[in-house]
Amino acid sequence: GYLFAYHRTFYQKSLRKSIKRQYAHTPYLQNDIIIDFYEDRCEEYFGDTLIRNYWKDMMEFKISDELVIIMLNKNRCILIPKAQIPEQLAQLESLIDQVSRSEE
């Protein structure tokens, strides 16, 4: 009883506060993020910053029902909601398939 009430009330509130605080102090999340895809890399633009992520340096790709997940390393990934890219989704999945086959 008590553990469930604690988890349901205090833990969830604490988690929400922590996430909001992290979001507020992360410049990456404070800007629109644009991701361009190329045969050898993807480029992330946010604010005045450009980050080039080369396919050869990435860990893996994961595709779920709702997300395309690009694992850059064990601590960082790019999450792309499929609902945000309906017109480009088939192209992106094709590129990921092509990159995955070439990296094997």
Image: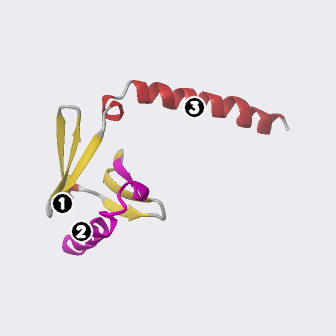
Identity of the residue drawn at 31% across and 28% down = 27
Q: Distance between the Cα atoms at labels 1 and 2?
A: 14 Å
Q: CA distance from mark 3 to mark 2?
A: 35 Å
Where is 14 relative to 93, above or below? above
From the image, tell me which residue sits under label 1.
56
Expressed as whole percent of the image width and height from the top left, the position of residue 14 reads: 61, 28
Labels 3 and 1 touching (C-beta < 8 A):
no
- Quadrant in the picture for residue 3: top right
Q: Which residue is mark 2?
A: 95
Foreground tag (1 vs 2): 2
- Classified by dominant secondary structure, the portion drawn in magenta counts as helix
Give the quarter of the image for residue 90: bottom left
Instruction: Tell me where residue 65 appears, x and y as whole percent.
Output: 48, 65
Q: Which residue is mark 3?
A: 16
Q: Amino acid at mark 3?
A: Arg
Horizontal placement of 55 versus 64: left or right? left
Location of the N terminus by quadrant is top right
